[in-house]
């Protein structure tokens, strides 16, 4: 009887309700449980809008944790704009079906699953409808052989529409969400919505990261607040959410990203700020 209730509850809340071939069966109950169960921390990285550096934060967070000796994976849940393989320089890899499931790609020790590794051409648009996108995410969760990871970083689609919400709801036992913003008021407006989206999912907001917070002039070294300053921290306080820290604008972050490399291991103020953020995050999760 308990099993039956559990089964119904899972299928009732699943975004694939109505189109899932396993609906109501035993597989539906265990469908998400196998691979993902052995992962200690599952963290979503979300943002109120695109272009604020969400994917940059995801890959650098994964790299920082991996460099500390943790086993780390990234699930690129942005099905229509999957950029993680590009940022990690692994666009030429693919996802291979092995005997036990789908083998994730490898970015110098970070396990990666992304729609970009399935598409034959990097510039092909993904024009799938909602249920197909959800089925792809479901397969990444269910069939990818993640192994016993310490951290799975899930790069959500940007914004606060139905899509990021449905994706996040597909993943069981999330540890919480990190929300990335930039300091200007238009971005903060959308970030407030992202905080409320996470709260509506009854998930803890681990904290807010403010990206692109000021630029150090390469000549006089004075800080220029291109997108204003301090907005992320004020907003975090206002919404009673932890502020994890800010990352300055650094043109090297962009050029390294374009070259498929992370910046966190480098010697720069932005890398120092980022390492401090990761330290705070580890303390919180501990
Ligand atoms: P999102 O995932 O939010 O759409 P991305 O992570 O793809 O954003 O970042 C958008 C662009 O901004 C990328 O080219 C990235 O390299 C660049 N970028 C991100 N953060 C910074 C920063 N702090 N300084 C300079 N460029 C940055």
Image: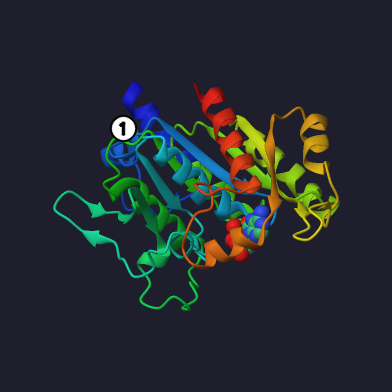
- Residue farthest along the left direction in this orientation: 99
Residue found 67% across the figure and 51% down from its top: 160
Image: 180 above or below 276: below
> Who is closer to the viewer here, 8 or 46?
46
Q: In the rendering, at what x and y percent does residue 153 appear? A: 47, 43
User: Total label count?
Assistant: 1
Q: Is mark 1 within 8 Å of ligand 1?
A: no
Would residue 50 be seen by someone viewing this image from the given angle?
no
Decide: few, some or many residues near mark 1? Use Cα within 10 Å; few <14, some 14-19, many ≥20. few
- Dividing the image into four quarters, tell me where ligand 1 lies: bottom right
Residue found 53% across the figure and 62% down from its top: 256
Q: Is residue 21 left or right of residue 61?
A: left
- Label 1, secondary structure: give it: helix
Residue found 53% across the figure and 42% down from its top: 44
Task: Identify the residue under disc 1.
Answer: 38
Q: In the rendering, at what x and y percent does residue 238 appear? A: 83, 31
> Who is closer to the viewer here, 49 or 166?
49
């Amino acid at each position: 009887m308990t099993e039956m209730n559990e089964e119904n509850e899972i299928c009732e809340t699943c975004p694939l309700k109505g189109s899932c071939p396993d609906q109501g069966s035993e597989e539906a109950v265990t469908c998400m449980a196998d691979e993902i169960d052995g992962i200690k921390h599952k963290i979503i990285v979300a943002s109120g809008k695109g272009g604020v550096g969400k994917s940059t934060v995801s890959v650098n967070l994964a790299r920082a944790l991996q460099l500390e000796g943790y086993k780390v994976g990234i699930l690129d849940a942005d099905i229509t704009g999957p950029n993680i393989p590009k940022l990690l320089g692994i666009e030429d890899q693919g996802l291979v079906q092995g005997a036990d499931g789908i083998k994730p790609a490898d970015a110098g020790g970070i396990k990666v699953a992304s729609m970009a590794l399935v598409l034959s051409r990097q510039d092909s648009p993904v024009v799938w409808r909602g249920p197909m996108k959800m089925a792809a995410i479901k397969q990444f969760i269910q069939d990818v052989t993640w192994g016993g990871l310490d951290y799975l970083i899930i790069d959500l689609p940007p914004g606060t529409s139905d899509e990021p919400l449905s994706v996040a709801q597909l993943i069981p036992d999330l540890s919480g969400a990190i929300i990335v913003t930039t300091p200007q008021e238009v971005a903060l407006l959308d970030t407030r919505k992202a905080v409320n989206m996470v709260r509506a999912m009854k998930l803890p907001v681990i904290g807010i990261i403010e990206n692109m917070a000021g630029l150090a002039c390469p000549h006089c070294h004075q800080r220029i607040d291109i997108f204003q300053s301090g907005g992320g921290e004020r907003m975090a306080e206002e919404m009673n959410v932890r502020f994890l820290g800010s990352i300055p604008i650094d043109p090297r972050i962009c050029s390294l990203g374009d070259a498929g490399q992370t910046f966190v291991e480098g010697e720069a103020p932005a890398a120092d700020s980022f390492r401090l953020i990761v330290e705070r995050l580890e303390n919180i999760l501990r």
